[in-house]
Image (spheres, helix red, strand yellow):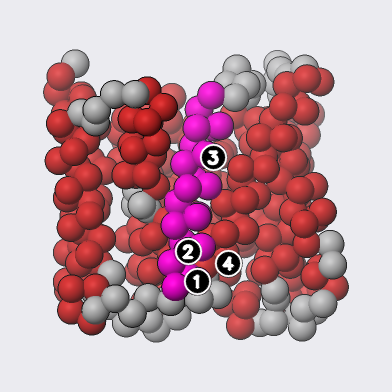
Amino acid sequence: MNKRISVLIVLLGGMSFGVLSTIVKKSYDAGMNLGQVSVAQALLGALLLWAFILFKKLSDKEYKLNFTKKEAITLMVSGISTACTSIVYYKSLQYLSASMAILLLFQFTWIGNIIECILDRKLMEKKKVIALVILIGGTLLASNVLIDGFNINPMGLLFGILAALCYCVFMYVNGKVVTNVNPIQRSAWMITGATIFLTIVFYKSLFTGNASLFVEFEYGIPLALFGNVIPPVFFSIGVPIVGIGLSSILGSIELPVATLCSVIVLHEQTSLIRWVGIILILTAIIIPVALEKNKK
């Protein structure tokens, strides 16, 4: 496949993540609660992924299901990290604007670096320190803290940071656990595990919301498509050609897309300073990858 097309595919995968916060906000306005949003996305996502796998199996005789029973169980347990990220991130959206929630989620970049330093018992590399300083500066600008003061809802802040922590765990699990399985099949098992976990956690609240079954499908299907189906399918196609380093940079398009969607669809307020902050955050993500590439 042409590399330019692969770049576009990876970009589209990253962009799809960016629209989630806006859809979740709209689903809350339609009467859905946290449990209904989380379970609807995971359940429909799992069904769509397995339907895609079945289609591939029936249409391509060479397509194989390359996992063992033990690997399937391991991946389902690993899906709890996905479920926990959804819970705390979507919970933060009950207290924060969509643009602020995604901003806090993106703090996973420096949180992940600090956790890595603690686990490896070594100091952070110079390039990562530079990126961290830029990222903190960008966050201060993008959050308008320097202008409006610290007026972020404390519960929203708590769940936003927890979302970043859970996302770090998800990233670690995604990169370490049963990596030999086909990416789409891997995602299907993880989302299946997430569905089971979320259903157990929210079984009482699944029938207490004000939304009809039609509304749950109306928002559940796009959440599943943009959150659980398009990203793994597109990344499995594009990342092997583009490379992990460039893909991580391209995937950061989620942040500006989420902010843009919140402005256009939800009519949230933004400013030039906030966009400068977002550009700085993206720069902080790009620097370590670019320096590593030049080093090689």
Q: CA distance from mark 2 to mark 4?
A: 10 Å
Between 197 and 111, which is closer to the camera in this rendering? 111
User: What's the residue at 47%, 64% (across, down)?
Assistant: 158
Residue bearing the label numbered 1: 155
Residue 10 position within the rendered picture, expressed as x and y whole percent measured from the top left: 41, 40
Residue 292, compared with residue 248, is above or below; it is above
Mark 1: few, some, or many residues within 10 Å (few <14, many ≥20)? some
**Highlighted magenta segment, given as a residue range:** 154-176
Residue bearing the label numbered 3: 170
Residue 250 position within the rendered picture, expressed as x and y whole percent measured from the top left: 33, 43
Label 1 with label 2: CB-CB less than 8 Å: yes
Camera-nearest label, 2 or 4 = 2
Q: CA distance from mark 4 to mark 3?
A: 17 Å
Between 245 and 127, which is closer to the camera in this rendering? 127
Q: Is residue 175 magenta?
A: yes
Residue bearing the label numbered 4: 91
Label 2 with label 4: CB-CB less than 8 Å: no
Q: Secondary structure at mark 1?
A: helix
Question: Which disc is residue 158 wearing?
Answer: 2
Residue 234 position within the rendered picture, expressed as x and y whole percent measured from the top left: 51, 39
Q: Identity of the amino acid at label 4?
A: Lys
Camera-nearest label, 4 or 1 = 1
* Quadrant in the rendering for residue 38: bottom right
